[in-house]
Amino acid sequence: MKDIGITSASTQLGINGGMKSCSLVTNIGMSFAADKLGRRPMYLISTIGTFVVFNIATIVAARYAATPQSSLGAAFVAMLFIYGFFYDFKYATALG
């Protein structure tokens, strides 16, 4: 978080807590939907989603390293949340 300009401990705690809360909701919701959606489609959606979002996050992080802007830092945090969603989507296929 410090690398993208978020230095406040309370802000970092809030972001990390929000990510874990979103993960909990996603895992519970997707574990109930695994039988209806099917494990293979869920796995494919998760794999493609994490691939795309990770590439975007890498680009945003590189842009921030070149020219630090708070909007790029916020975009990177958003990419972390979206990446976590897709990652938890895959994890829920193992739980369901």
Image: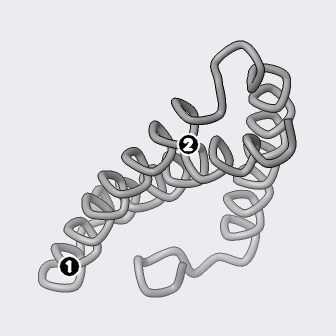
- Left of 71 or right of it: where is 13? right
Q: Amino acid at mark 2?
A: Tyr
Q: Amino acid at mark 1?
A: Ala
Q: Nearer the viewer, residue 60 or 32?
A: 32
| Residue found at x 20% / y 79% | 62
* Whole-percent x, y for residue 45 in the image: 46, 37
Q: Are marks 1 and 2 in contact (CB under 8 Å)?
A: no
At mark 1, the secondary structure is: helix
Q: Tell me which corner region of the image, top left, top right, bottom left or bottom right, holds residue 15.
A: bottom right
10 versus 48 height, above or below: below
Q: Tell me which corner region of the image, top left, top right, bottom left or bottom right, holds residue 93.
A: top right
Work out which quarter of the rendered image holds the N terminus and state it.
Answer: bottom right
* Whole-percent x, y for residue 21 in the image: 81, 45
- Disc 2: CA contacts within 10 A as few (<14), some (14-19) or many (>=20): many
* Whole-percent x, y for residue 35 in the image: 77, 20
Label 1: which residue? 62
Label 2: which residue? 43
* Whole-percent x, y for residue 63 in the image: 16, 73
- Left of 34 or right of it: where is 90? left
| Residue found at x 80% / y 26% | 29
Q: How is the image coloured?
A: one colour
- Left of 72 or right of it: where is 36? right
- Disc 1: CA contacts within 10 A as few (<14), some (14-19) or many (>=20): few
| Residue found at x 82% / y 32% | 31
